[in-house]
Image (cartoon, grey):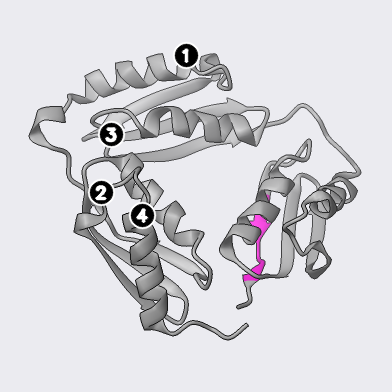
Amino acid sequence: MSMKSDKDLQHDVMEDLRWDPSIDASKIGVATSDGVVTLTGAVPSYFQKQAAERISKRVVGVRAVANDIEVQLPSAVEKSDAGIAITALNALTWSSSVPDETIKVSVSKGWVTLEGKVEWNYQREAAEKAVEELIGVKGVTNRICVSPHIKSREVKHEIKAALHRYAELESRNIEVEATDSTVTLRGSVRSWAERKEAENAAWMAPGVTQVKNEIVVSV
């Protein structure tokens, strides 16, 4: 597969941003260089900033994304840090995937910081998702640590087996290395989405507290 030109890649990313109804792409700028996409401009919520990055990464030919989009909240939705903190705590309590009793929330100038410990990475991600869509949030720093009670000596085998089950993934080009609770992925895939899919599979293994994704996107 031949590599897209910067102009073609820029066009495809801009079109996908415009196509997706979850964001307002009218004030988002896109620049490309050798498969690296830089997003600039402004959006009215942190959720839209994160969504713009996710949308860009799924475009074929994108190797990396630098997200320089600013969150500019409409004056009508500006909230106090205390108000955001209370809403965030409620959101964590309402989420069935989050052990809210182990998570602490702090807010400074609209930026939410999450701290604490959970047993699984999906709980860590669920906590972030629970607060990133809240009104008034300008950003989220996720400092929650994964501290599992399960230790598996067969992490590498389990991850390789999971990769083989994924029909859309060329698993034979992926190497898995497991040291204690840290997993390192190496090799090459055809798209950023496949790279992320491989990383997700590694995070699902019991006992994993860190995933180093060194897979390259080869287009």
Q: What secondary structure characterizes most of the magenta part?
A: strand
Q: Which residue is drawn at 72% across and 47% down?
A: 201
Q: Distance between the residues labelled 2 and 3?
A: 17 Å
- Please, what is the three-letter code of the amino acid marked with disc 4? Trp
Q: Mark 3 points at which residue?
A: 137
Q: Mark 2 points at which residue?
A: 24
Q: How far apart are marks 4 and 3 (CA)?
A: 25 Å
On the image, the x and y values in percent for residue 88 come to 36, 22
Q: Quadrant of residue 48?
A: top left
Q: In which quarter of the image is residue 74?
A: top left
Which is nearer the N-term, disc 4 or disc 3? 4
On the image, the x and y values in percent for residue 149 come to 77, 26
Write down the region rendered in magenta.
Answer: 211-216
Badge 2 element: loop
Please give left or right for residue 99 compared with residue 48 in the image. Answer: right
Badge 3 element: loop
